[in-house]
Image (spheres, rainbow, N blue to C red):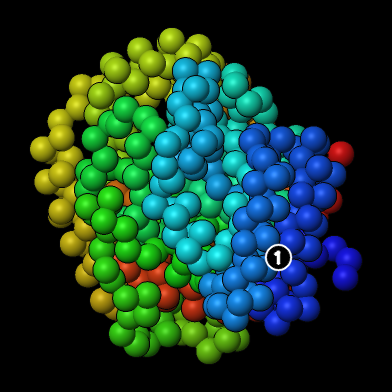
Amino acid sequence: MQDLWRLSAAEMASLIRSKKVSAKDAATAALARLDAVNPMINAVVDHRPEDVLAQASAIDAAIGRGEDPGPLGGVPVTVKVNIDQQGFATTNGLKLQRNAIAKSNSPVIDNLRKSGAVILGRTNCPAFSYRWFTTNLVHGDTKNPRDPSITPGGSSGGAGAAVAAGIGHIAHGTDIAGSIRYPAYACGVHGLRPTMGRIAAFNAALPERPIGPQISAVSGPLARTISDIRIALAAMSAKDYRDPWWVPAPLQGPAMPKRVAMCLNPDGLDPVPEVKAAVADAGKRLERAGWTVEEIADTPPLREPADLQTKLWLGDGYEAQLEAAEREGDPGALACLRGNRAKVHPFDLSKALTRRATLTREWLAFFENYAVLLMPVSGELPFPDQLDRKDEASFARVWHAQLPQIAIPFMGLPGLTVSTGLVGRVPVGVQLVSGRYREDLCLAAGEAVEAGGTPSAAIDPAG
C-alpha cells in the first residue's frame, strides 16, 4: 500500500487493528515522509528513528498476542518540544533549555502512548512559545508547507506544519492565546484548544512558573479531519493525578438544540472580506446540515478578556520573563515582551480574577441560548512571516487581528479551528466556541462545516 502517510488517523488505526498494515509499516512510512519533506519546512526538530520503530514493534507484538492496541494503536503522532518526553530536551525553543532533559513523560505523552500512539518526533515552537510565528535560536525557522512566505502560525507552528505536510496523522500542541488554533488556521488543518482542565499536563524537566487556574497553556490536538481531533481528544484527556486541575468531565454532554450564533465582526475586530466570507460560508454549511444559524451583531465582550488574558500571560512575573528573554537574546520574544509592556505592567492579579468571574458568567449565560458560536479565528488571512517584527504598526496589527484567539481562553472556553478552504494557496477557516467542557458541541458543528466543503488533505510543501 502506497502513501500511508496520507491516511487519517482513524483509517490507519483500523488497518493496523485488522492486520492489513503493521504498525512498523506505518512507522516506516512516517519516517520516510519526515525524511522527504522535513528539510524543506523544519517542522520536526528532534526524533529518533530507532525509538519510533521500537514503539511500533511493541504495538505489533501486542496485536499478535490478541491484545487491544488502543484507539490510536500504531498511529504516528508528533508532540511539541515544550512538553516532557523522557530522554529528550524540553527546550520550548530556547538555547537556555537545550540541556533540560526530561527524566519522565508529561501526562500528555503517557496518555497518547496508553492509547497506542507512536510518538514520531518533536515539533518546533518560537522561543518561550510566545508568538504566532515559529522561529528561535536553537532550532531555527519553521516554514508553512502551503506557502513559505506566510507564517506557519505559532506557537505550535511545527505541529501545524507537520500534520499539514503528512508528517504524522495527529499533532500535539499547546494553546494559551491561539497557539493551537492559529497554526491550524495558517496551515489549513483543524485544531482544538480544549477547556482548561480537560487534558492533564505537567512538566518536571523545567523550573515551573506557577501553573493552575490563573493561566496555563492547554494541550490539545491538530489533525486533518475532525474525526481525528475527536479521537485524539479522547486519548489525551485521560486522568493523571500529576495535574491537580484535571477535571473528570464527560466527553459527551447533555443534548442541546442545534442552534448557532454567527458573528462576522465580533467586538470591533473589523475582519478582511475573505474572513467574513469564510464565516458566512460556514454558516450556510451548518444550515444545510440542519443547524439553525442566527446572525448576531456582536458577541459578549472579547476585547476586555483579551487584554486581561494578555496581562495574566505576560504581566505575571513580567520582569523575570523579560530577564530570561534578554539572556536568551531571541528577537521575537523580546519584541513580544517589550511591545506589550505598557499593557501588562504593572499587574493586578486580584482585579483580573474579579473581572474574569463577571465576564465568564456573561459568556456562560450566552451559551444557555446557543450551542455554538461561529466567528473568525483571526481578523486577517495568515500573516506574512515575521510580520510582528517589521515595525510598531505591524506589531499592533498582528495583536489586533488575533483578538478572537486571545480572549476565549480567559473564560476557560473550548475553541475549535475548522479549516474551510483556500484563498489562492493561503488557507482560511473559522472558529467554533462553546460552553465549558462542551468540546462535543464544537466537534459536532465542526463535522458539519467540514462535510460541507473540501476535506483537508496532506500536501507536498510548496516552493
The residue that appears at 27% across and 68% down in the rendered structure is 248
- Above or below, 154 against 375 in this view is above
Q: Nearer the viewer, residue 188 or 60?
A: 60
The residue that appears at 40% across and 21% down in the rendered structure is 337
User: Going by the image, does 449 lie left or right of 424?
Assistant: left
Residue that lies at the very extreme toward the front in this rendered image: 65
Q: Nearer the viewer, residue 247 or 431?
A: 247
Is residue 271 visible in the rendered structure shown here?
A: no
User: Going by the image, does 212 lie left or right of 238?
Assistant: left
Q: Nearer the viewer, residue 379 or 185?
A: 185
The residue that appears at 30% across and 31% down in the rendered structure is 208
- Above or below, 69 against 203 in this view is below
Is residue 248 visible in the rendered structure shown here?
A: yes
Callout 1 secondary element:
helix
**x, y percent for residue 200:** 34, 55
Quadrant assignment for the N terminus: bottom right
**x, y percent for residue 209:** 28, 31
User: Going by the image, does 136 lie left or right of 237?
Assistant: right
- Above or below, 336 against 196 in this view is above
User: Going by the image, does 58 lie left or right of 29?
Assistant: left
User: Residue 422: which quarter of the image?
Assistant: bottom right
Q: Residues within 10 Å of mark 1 (few under 14, many from 20)?
A: many
The residue that appears at 20% across and 27% down in the rendered structure is 347
Quadrant assignment for the C terminus: top right
Number of numbered labels in the structure image: 1
- Above or below, 240 against 382 in this view is below
Amino acid found under the numbered disc labelled 1: Ala
| Residue named by callout 1 | 23
**x, y percent for residue 197:** 29, 57
**x, y percent for residue 267:** 38, 52
